[in-house]
Image (tube, coloured by chain):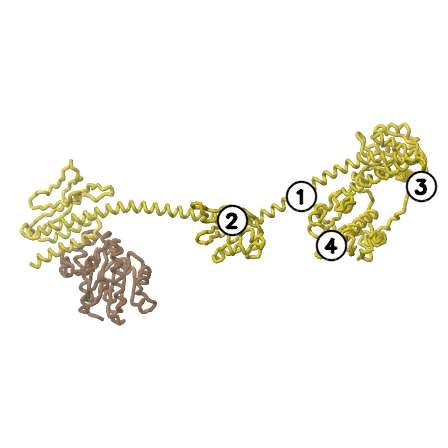
Chain colours: A yellow, B brown
Amino acid sequence: MNQRFKVIGQISAAENIFHVLPSNKKIGDFSAQALKKVPGVASCCICIFGEPHPSGDLLPVFCEGCDIVLRSLCPDQERVCRFDGKENYETYFLNTAARFFGTLILEISDPDAFSLYSPFVSNFSNTITINMENLWQKKQLQTKNSALEKYRHHLESLIKERTEQLEKSEQLLDNTQKMAKIGGWEWDVDKQTMAWTAATYHIHGLNPDNHEKCSPESSLQCYDPADQLVICKAFKQCIKDKTPYDMQFCITTYQNHRVWIRTMGWPVLEDGRVIKILGNIMDISHYKKLEEERVALAKQLQHALKADSLARMAGAIAHHYNNQLNVVMGNLELALEDTPADAGFRDNLTEAMHAARKSAEISELMLTYLGQGSGETSQLDLSKLCRSYLPILRTSLPKDIALETDFMSAGPAILTNVNQMQIILTHLITNAAEAINGNTGRIRLSVGVIPVSDIPEIVTAPEDWHPEAATYACLEVTDTGIGINEQNMEKLFDPFFTTKFTGRGMGLPVILGLVKSWVGAICVENRKDRGARVRIYLPVQEDTIAAQPDIKRRWQSVEKGGTVLLVDDQDAVRKTGAGMLRRLGYSPMSASSGLEAVAVFREHHNEICCVITDLTMPDMDGWETLAALRKIQPDLPVVLVSGHDQSQAMKQDRPEKFQAFLHKPYAMIQLKNALLKALQQGS
Amino acid sequence: MKREDDKISLGFDNKAYPAGTHMCLIYNDEAERLKIISKYLEKGLKTGGRVAYFVDEITPMEIYSWLDKLDVAPPEKNLYAAFTAAEAQKTYCPDGTFIPDRMLATLRDFYDQSVNQGYPHCRVCGEMGWALKNLPGSDRLMEYESLVNVVVTTHPVTAVCQYDANRFDGVTILKCLEVHPYMIVHGQVVHNPYYITPEEFLGSAQQVVK
């Protein structure tokens, strides 16, 4: 009895183990081993038909017990087991309605003993089948789950990939925004909440972790008071009127930096109502700087074009205008000489002569402005020069204006021209006095020396000036006048620009022209308290100062008659010149070109004592004519004539030298002096 | 030290069992295994006993981490002293060969040391996967398992032997049932009707363990 219970218990225990066995084969092996313990059983095996395949089919496997292949459970195929119905064998088909798993085969040695356990074995075989079916179902489920799992993994990896892409995009956007200095923001109208991107924090000079600062108020604090009103108005209008805005401001960040920003906001509508404001904030400081540089460059270009245009105009003045003026003035002079003192039209001629001289002066000023002013330079003591000119300056000032001075006891030495420096002083003091405009005031004139490092980086004019000397003389004029209107500051050095009804507008342009020709610069500025300050910087000369020239020095009148060959391509100029020469006691010969001059000179070289030749002529210019004539007579005295000033005419280094230079338009006395100088040097 | 007739709790069910109970856990569900074993270890430590765990599936460090998560490994040194985690292969086959008598002696020593150190009880738990590595002598595993039942009568070490149904074949699993008087089924300790006494088991035909 105990034995029977034990066997039944074993069978029951074995059934309890099935749930942990992971495969049909293991269940089969385990079951066969367990059933061998059943009394009356000689041996036992289980032909496992097949392992459930993921496709759901049962695949045939080799049966160790019957040495035959069990075929799949298909309607057209017969299940085959050679032990089925065989004596001493008990076979149990392990199948459900849907599937066939195999056959349990018992070899019975004692049928009587086995009969006690037969129902339990039969039940056991059912339990085997149920567990196999469970496994099959489980594997089917696993297969489905596996597919689902695979799909889930696919989705998860897709989500992960998209998330990474998004994160990368966000990172890229963040980096791009950082690099481009563009921040984004969003205002939720209903919730009254704001969101900023990291770049928005950076632009405001805030740490992106400082979320407390993410508010319109925090942003507003960075704006200048006047701008706060403007941006507030635009923001409110955007909500109220649904109008976007796009504005530029200069803000002060929380790091106390001044930053130019462009801020834009546009409404987001839902059912016709503004629910959000989306916006950008862009740091445009760099663009502003570039824009300023572009404007400055455009300005420089404009100035360069203007200078080029003026230079061409100067060329025209020098060549055409002065030539014509030379004829006008020469003929007027000749006519005046021939006119009796009591002649009624003498006043008319005098007026015409006066106007012609004024025109010549303006022409001269124009050339001076362009740095082509006539006048030889020498090293002079600036303090001494200013001091010597003080009496004249004081005389020109109204009584209510005090002229204060601060000169050095001696020096500095500068390369300048006395007369031109006097022109500068006159213009500066006159301008200062006019700025005081009839009121009581002070003008201060001072001379000093400063190192180059003390010169402002940006001078008023010339704009392209670069200091080259180590030390500079500083001539400074300050006044207590009304100062200079900012709008006029840019035009100060434009020719003919004046704020005075009677002015010619050539004062500062002429000063600039002279200073330019002396390689100096000018700074004009309004003083902080009142009035203006003009500073002229001129390079200090290291050499010793030459003796001041005698202003009254004139060429000694060495009367010397003779034949003079006058060379000019313009008939009127030749005609006027010839008339003036005759009046001076010379016998004029004339030639209209260099070639003709050479021919005339070859024929009359024994008679001609001096040649006056124009510089600018077609075919052979003045220099070539000079060289050709000198080949015939090396010591020939020559006067060179030009509408340009002497330094300009001498720019080209020529081996042949002339004895005197005559600037057009010239008066008879200037012609006389030039001839005398040439003849004197020639002799 | 409790004697064989003393009852101890295994932790994973509500019953009390005699010290020196020798049982097998045949499993194919890792989560269920961990649940049973962790409670078994936890109970042993929390009741002041000495515990040894022979790892094969996991590393000793994982066992310590496991205990940390169970909140049964507070920083007291004595608790760590009460717990030993060792690699099963090095424990069963210290020189690469499995010799049942040597392991049985180790088991006895473990018990004696525990007594000497004043532990009220001691328990071991082993993952038996090492037996599938074809190490010399590993075919004598069932002989050893059977003899453990003799040892625990004098040295009542409570023991749980874990067999992974996924790795051991069906024949071995039935053999396993023949040498463990108790088995853990569905988280319960049950008498094993297949159990055969050592005398009967060892007196029968040669046992072959794959």
Question: Which residue position holds label 1?
Answer: A299
The numbered mark, 3 or 2, whose residue comes first in the sequence reads 2
The Cα–Cα distance between marks 4 and 1, rounded to whole angstroms, is 27 Å
Comparing labels 3 and 1, the label whose residue is closer to the camera:
1
Q: Quadrant of residue A662?
A: top right
At label 3, the amino acid type is Ser
Cα gap from disc 2 to disc 4, whole angstroms: 45 Å
Disc 4 or 1, which lies upstream in sequence? 1
Label number found at residue A318 = none
Of the residues shown, which amino acid type is indicated by label 2? Gln
- Mark 3 vs mark 1: same chain? yes
Q: Which mark is residue A531?
A: 4
x, y percent for residue A450: 75, 55
Residue at the image point whose x is 12% and y is 50% from the top: A123
Report x, y in % for residue B37.
25, 60
Depth check: give the residue in front, A94 or B157.
Answer: A94
Q: Which residue is mark 2?
A: A237
Same subunit: marks 3 and 2: yes
| Residue at numbered disc 3 | A557
The label nearer to you, 3 versus 2, is 2
Q: Are marks 2 and 4 on the same chain?
A: yes
Return the residue nearer the eye: A245 or B145.
Answer: A245
- Residue A363 in sight in this render: yes
In which quadrant is the N terminus of chain A drawn? bottom left
For the residues labelled 3 and 1, the Cα–Cα distance comes to 52 Å
- Asked whether the beta carbons under mark 4 and mark 1 sit within 8 Å of each other, the answer is no
